[in-house]
């Protein structure tokens, strides 16, 4: 299983360690790429919309492409983020924003409808659920049908301060989660399909000159083709 890990921080904190723990339990020999944000993509979306008409026109296209080529070729995506102010980190949010054309209302990639993903977030106290939701919502709109999450409150500022008891529990939890992910079959469910069909109806109302409508038409999704078949 080819794995790509995207970390919402440059440092190797608690979320990083948990994400790596999962990857190594699932398939350590197949971690094909690991990206740290903002080091790998140190930009915010400018809102210029150039990417809607031409993906290569984004001023940060080369850096995005280096990440997304690996993402598209992976079987499993692992996203890790610390919980900052009860949400995902700013670099992770910037990454999501910069790849908004992958969302179903725009130009979703067929390959996303066959992937698994895990979202990991650790916090000293609270906020993991909302941080995870920031990423899992994006994955839903990307078309990723199988998304699991793992959030934990550590009562510690860094991994070194986490108690041995807590680390032992994380070890057990990640082992159980890794087994579940490894054995699971990817199947596009009702929620993903329902969102696709809602977006399909919306795309049909777009002007015929719309690049997004042309993209859907060229893929056959306005006809009988579906990205999961």
Image (cartoon, rainbow, N blue to C red):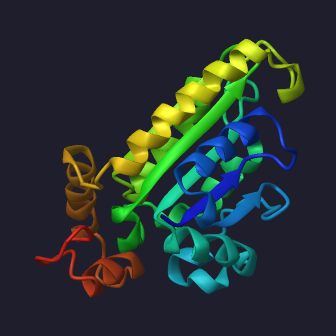
Residue 201: x percent and y percent?
20, 61
Q: Determine if residue 179 is in view.
A: yes
Residue 46 can be seen in this image: no
Dividing the picture into quadrants, the one containing residue 5 is bottom right
How many marks do you count on the picture? 0
Q: Quadrant of residue 127?
A: top right
Q: Judge by depth and name the residue closer to the eye, 199 or 31.
A: 31
Q: Residue at x 19, y 46 (%)?
A: 190
Q: Nearer the viewer, residue 197 or 23?
A: 23
Task: Locate the C terminus and report the quarter of the image it occupies.
Answer: bottom left
Q: Residue furthest left?
A: 224
Residue 163 image position (x, y, % from top left): 79, 14
Q: Look at the picture and state if 124 lies above or below 193.
A: above
Indicate whether 10 appears above or below 120.
Answer: below
Residue sitting nearer the eye, 143 or 44: 143
Q: Is residue 87 left or right of residue 193?
A: right
The image quadrant that residue 147 belongs to is top left
Residue 156, horizontal then vertical, whole percent? 83, 17
Q: Residue at x 63, y 29 (%)?
A: 171
Question: What is the x, y in percent for residue 228?
Answer: 24, 67
Is 173 on the left or on the right of 197, as rendered? right
Quick check: 127 above or below 65?
A: above
Q: Residue at x 24, y 54 (%)?
A: 187
**Residue at the image position 35 percent from the left and 85 percent from the top:** 209
């Amino acid at each position: 299983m080819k794995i790509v890990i995207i970390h919402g921080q440059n440092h190797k904190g608690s979320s990083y360690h948990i994400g790596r723990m999962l990857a190594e339990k699932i398939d350590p020999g197949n971690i094909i790429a690991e990206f740290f944000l903002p080091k790998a993509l140190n930009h915010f979306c400018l809102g210029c919309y150039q990417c809607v008409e031409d993906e290569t026109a984004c001023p940060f296209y080369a850096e995005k492409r280096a990440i997304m080529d690996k993402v598209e070729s992976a079987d499993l995506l692992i996203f890790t983020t610390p919980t900052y102010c009860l949400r995902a980190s700013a670099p992770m949010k910037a990454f999501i924003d910069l790849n908004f054309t992958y969302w179903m209302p725009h130009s979703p990639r067929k390959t996303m409808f066959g992937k698994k993903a895990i979202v990991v977030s650790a916090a000293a106290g609270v906020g993991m659920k909302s941080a995870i939701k920031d990423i899992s919502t994006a994955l839903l709109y990307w078309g990723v049908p199988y998304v699991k999450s793992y959030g934990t409150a550590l009562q510690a500022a860094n991994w070194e301060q986490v108690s041995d008891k807590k680390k032992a529990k994380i070890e057990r939890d990640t082992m159980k989660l890794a087994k579940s992910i490894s054995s699971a079959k990817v199947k596009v469910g009702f929620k993903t399909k329902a969102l696709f069909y809602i977006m399909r109806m919306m795309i049909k109302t777009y002007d015929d000159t719309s690049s997004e409508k042309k993209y859907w038409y060229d893929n056959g999704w306005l006809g009988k083709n579906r990205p999961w078949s």
